[in-house]
Image: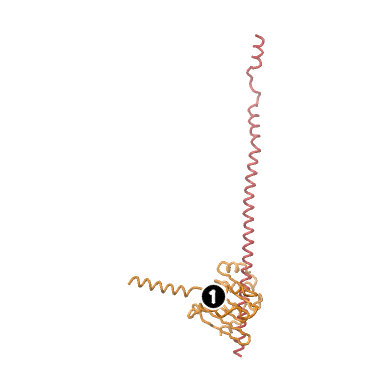
């Protein structure tokens, strides 16, 4: 009986740990850089994120805004690829990422499909205690693929406030929430 | 023979050292050691200066590396936010298009 209880407790703990685990960008997405004509690979987490915050000036209003925005983040991961032509990547390359974004932890808040430009954007949020605790964005176009994974409490209002600075376009956070 | 004995006795007679002879010898002996002591002090000072210089250099190199890493991380964060905000902008525009 005691053994059964221990086994059950272990299964529950393992399930909880698996659920709490952060999203990882699959290797096959990273491999796309070999096929891309242009690629961006941003991996900033833990100590590096703190170091970046240290070099953002508190006296400069723009830099202070970025500093505030990243103060609650645990990691920022971006993979963006531009290909010479369509068909260089497939949905299967992104499927391993989509498979990690499961309810109830993750919910797809926005899904934009455009037949005109072939654009397909999905925005997933991880909610914890009614707060956004993570964001994953998958933007797929015939010749472009962008994956963003932001780990930690991201404030979309703060992100919107960065619009117009550092070459960051203006974002209406209210609309994204819809 | 007697003359030779007298002459030898005279030459080998006991004689007291002149006044201040012992002090002069001691003084010369002390002067003889001083350049070696100075060399030791100079070597020690050079070693201390080299260690201090090495530590200072290491600090400068570490600070420079930290600054470079910090600036690179800052640029990466801004680039990531730029891409994210850009994509969210597309979403916003599409949502607005559908809504209108």
- Taking A116 as reference, is A28 above or below it? above
- Taking A20 as reference, is B27 above or below it? above
State the residue in front, A48 or A92. Answer: A92
Q: Position of residue A23 (x, y in %)?
A: 52, 74
Q: Position of residue A176 (x, y in %)?
A: 58, 83
User: Where does the C terminus of chain B fall, quadrant-wise?
Assistant: bottom right
Horizontal side of residue A4 vs A98, given as left or right: left
Dot 1 falls on which chain? Answer: A
Q: Could you tell me if residue B8 is visible in this image?
A: yes
Quarter of the rendering containing residue A3: bottom left
User: Quick one: which chain is orange?
Assistant: A
- Taking A88 as reference, is B34 above or below it? above
- Taking A18 as reference, is B69 above or below it? above
User: Quick one: which chain is red?
Assistant: B
In this figure, which residue is indicated by the disc labeled 1?
A153
Residue found at x 65% / y 24%: B19
User: Where does the N terminus of chain B fall, quadrant-wise?
Assistant: top right
């Amino acid at each position: 009986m005691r053994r059964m209880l221990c086994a059950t407790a272990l299964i529950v703990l393992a399930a909880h740990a698996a659920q709490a685990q952060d999203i990882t960008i699959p290797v096959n997405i990273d491999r796309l850089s070999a096929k891309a004509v242009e690629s961006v690979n941003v991996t900033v987490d833990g100590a590096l994120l703190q170091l970046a915050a240290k070099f953002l000036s508190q006296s400069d209003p723009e830099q202070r805004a970025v500093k505030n925005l990243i103060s609650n983040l645990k990691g920022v991961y971006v993979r963006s690829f531009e290909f010479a032509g369509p068909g260089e990547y497939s949905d299967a390359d992104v499927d391993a990422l989509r498979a990690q974004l499961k309810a109830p932890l993750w919910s797809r808040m926005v899904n934009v499909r455009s037949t005109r430009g072939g654009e397909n954007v999905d925005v997933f949020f991880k909610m914890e205690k009614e707060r956004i605790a993570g964001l994953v964005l998958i933007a797929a176009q015939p010749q472009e693929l962008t994956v963003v994974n932001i780990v930690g409490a991201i404030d979309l209002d703060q992100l919107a406030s960065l619009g117009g600075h550092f070459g960051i376009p203006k974002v209406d956070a209210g609309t994204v929430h819809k | 023979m007697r003359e030779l004995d007298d002459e030898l006795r005279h030459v080998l007679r006991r004689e007291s050292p002149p006044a201040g002879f012992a002090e002069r010898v001691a003084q010369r002996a002390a002067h003889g050691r001083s350049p070696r002591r100075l060399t030791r002090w100079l070597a020690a000072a050079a070693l201390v200066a080299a260690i201090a210089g090495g530590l200072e250099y290491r600090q400068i190199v570490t600070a420079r590396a930290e600054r470079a890493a910090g600036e690179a991380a800052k640029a990466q964060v801004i680039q990531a936010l730029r891409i994210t905000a850009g994509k969210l902008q597309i979403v916003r525009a599409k949502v607005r298009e559908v809504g209108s």
